[in-house]
Amino acid sequence: MFMFDKAIVGSRRYWSWIVFLALVIAVGLACYLRQLSYGLGLTGMSRDVSWGIYIAQFTFFVGVAASAVMVVLPYYLHDVKQFGRITVLGELLAVAAVVMCLLFIFVDMGQPARVLNVLLYPTPTSMMFWDMVSLNGYLLLNAVISVVMLKAERTGVPAPHWVKPVVLVSIPWAVSIHTVTAFLYNGLPGRSLWYTAILAPRFLVSAFASGPSLLILLCLALRRLTRFDAGQEAIRRLGVIVTYAMTLNVFFLLLELFTALYGRVPEHTETFQYLFFGLDGHTGLAPVMWASVLLALVSLVMLLVPGLRRREGVLAAAALCVFVSLWLEKGMGLIVAGFVPSPLEHVTSYSPTAPEWAIVLGIWAIGALLVTVFFKITVSIREAN
Amino acid sequence: MRDRPLIYAGLLVFLVLFTYPVWHGVAAKSSNAEPDLKLPATEKECVAPREYMRTSHMDLLISWRDGKVRDHQLTYRSPSGRVFDVSLTQTCLGCHGKREQFCDRCHTYAAVSGPYCWDCHNDAPGGTSQPKAGGGASVALSHPTLNSTALRRTAANPAALPGRPQ
Amino acid sequence: MKITRKDFLKILGGSAVAATAGTLARSAASAEPNAATNKAAEPKAAVKRWGMVIDTSKCRESGCDDCIRACRVAHNIPQIPNPKQEIKWIWKEPFENVFPMQQTDYTRQAFKTPLTVLCNHCADPGCVRVCPTKATWKREDDGIVMMDYHRCIGCRYCMAGCPYGSRSFNFVDPRPYVAEINPEYPTRTKGVVEKCNFCEERLAVGKQPACVEACRDKALVFGDLNDENSGIRQVLRERFAVQRKPELGFGPAVFYLL
């Protein structure tokens, strides 16, 4: 039913890649088992910075998962036919990204065996409860949609009627998963960096920039590695989406900076000062943030100049810059900086330890493995037809 | 014909693996003697009838736990009318003694590894089996960054064995 | 009776949905099963709200940690050598860390006493709001914000949600770092969050919290904020007291006489 038979036939290059990913996963798993027995003290987290790269990566990849809506919505609601070949790729990418999110949450738990308590003792006032509901719902939706669509392609029959409403539900649901994730942070009055209404819009636009960027890079990779071509129009239109989203993203950041720096309320300026310049000698995040800013500006130049954006090489470079810039901003900066300074005005720095990185890489490798397998199935089905 | 050594070797490996439980048991000197339970000398009546405790002591403990922690119910009236303090260490172990001489006997015999009560609760009434490392400041666990020695060091607490459900 | 595969799958799907919905509904309705425990009939007492006043004029400027040590002994609080992973339920902080916006260059000299900080057992706690499993909740009959170490999944959302920094997480197994285990209170295990519990186990047997009892200068006043005639209410009527971060609206129950 899941057509995995298509994924076990492949070239030498394909299998080398799978084996490489399996090795990375094995190392990550070994480190995770060590973390299970020793405790989260194996990571760089602390009493003050109690969420680190695991939760930051979860936040970033929820955005990537939500971005499937950026190909689904134009195709299904506005008849943008050029996206026809890549909607399923967007949905499969969403499945892989949501699985990564769930794994990142799981490895962050102090008592992972009890994680089902969230479902056994549902607490509607907690945004984490709703996050679990919406993430798993989104996973189910996209998994069902992808399987049904691919099945239909493989057998050559049109997809069943009932899948259309499911696709339509997935559109607001995609927006909801990232809004709920933003609410996790947004709803904490004690954390001034996050306690801002624009956090959810910031999350959404950075999702709509980073996700389609990744999709562009994946489509270009598919074109190079297989006979599947997403189509020049589809890639061009994705580029337009990334351009708008990235521009809005930078604009929203500037709005935040204006509010903090013009108002000059110490509680708000301190967090941005920590991010970009450091506080009390702790400057760990400053290089990260400036790199993110630099990459964002470079990417905007490449994206906003139509002559440049139209060249696929430049678009690919811009997509990479956007992805890395947003990964640095959201996947490293935003979450950690919310904890600095601490509620008692202490500045504690955070950097992931080696085992922590190994676990992060292991989960990335799982995501890459899922994307590889899913795309292999898709491409094989299309090449057969 | 050339495969014969390989086949015999494979059969031998299979035989060894298949009989693993037997010779591992011999090596570990495990016996099938019934658990040697020492019942309390003074008290003859438990918080519930013996048969109920035999089959359902885990249910009782969980309802004690949730009742005390979450519903602030600090006492328990047994079916015979006696009122007990709800406390694993003080009430249960107060009669049954250290866990090694009571709880662990049956749990080890029946290979029940689930209960991790003792990771938090004191496992001897009025005192606890001391942490093996000699406690306190003498165990200087440095922050496990890239220090591989720190990574290999296991927690001094005997309860934190790998494979324990956490 | 012939049934098509499609119909069979429909029935299967419907049953699965019904079963899940039923389980969820049942578990939501009966969140705290309590079969075997029976409660002796007790008269319904008036609702208490435990609170504390810290009289900083009585607190020494340095060299005294009676309250901290008492809490540590009473609750098996480990001494973790790595300061990033420390566990503390009650401790001291300089004034400008506790009331950062109330400190200026002109007033710095006037107040040198470090302030004792602990969980504020808020009226509308930010931690309770965000806990996804109700492992932390506000007890109705006495206002203490409780912790259930059995249910905590270690997600640390409560730590992010507390605006006062009152909560600690067990990054490692704490037992090796407890010098002498007090048999009357359990230790905790790695992977759960903990904080001051206003010594609810001592209050249950009519004692005062360990810190209050241990303070040699009687700087900590503890009592029922809902009882107009209590000592703590008397103190609050006579001397002006402040709370930490009152503008957030969490309603802390710990007051400071500065």
Image: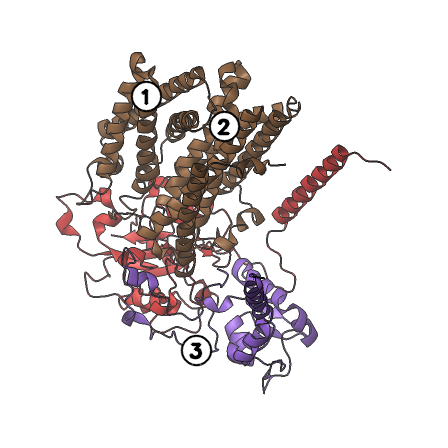
Of labels 3 and 2, the one closer to you: 2
Colour assignment, chain C:
red
Q: Chain of mark 2?
A: A
| Amino acid type, label 3 | Gly
Of labels 3 and 1, the one closer to you: 1
x and y percentages locating residue C9 in the rendered image: 72, 36
* Side of B19 relative to A321 (left or right): right
Q: Return the mark for residue B127.
A: 3
Between residues B24 and A337, which one lies in front from this camera angle?
B24
Colour assignment, chain B:
purple
In the image, residue C53 above or below residue A220:
below
- Residue positioned 81% across, 35% down in the render: C3
Q: Return the mark for residue A313.
A: 1
Colour assignment, chain A:
brown
- Assess whether mark 2 and mark 1 are in contact (beta carbons under 8 angstroms): no
Q: Residue furthest top?
A: A307
Q: Secondary structure at mark 1?
A: helix
Graded by Cα atoms within 10 Å as few (under 14), some (14 to 19) or many (20 or more), the crowding at tag 1 reads few
Q: Chain of mark 3?
A: B
Q: Is residue A367 visible?
A: no
Q: Label 3, label 2: how many angstroms apart (C-alpha)?
A: 61 Å
- Residue positioned 29% across, 40% down in the render: A337
* Side of A154 relative to A346 (left or right): right
x and y percentages locating residue C231 in the rendered image: 37, 60
Are marks 3 and 2 in one subunit? no
| Amino acid type, label 1 | Gly
Q: Label 3, label 1: how many angstroms apart (C-alpha)?
A: 71 Å
Pointer 2 residue: A89
Graded by Cα atoms within 10 Å as few (under 14), some (14 to 19) or many (20 or more), the crowding at tag 3 reads some
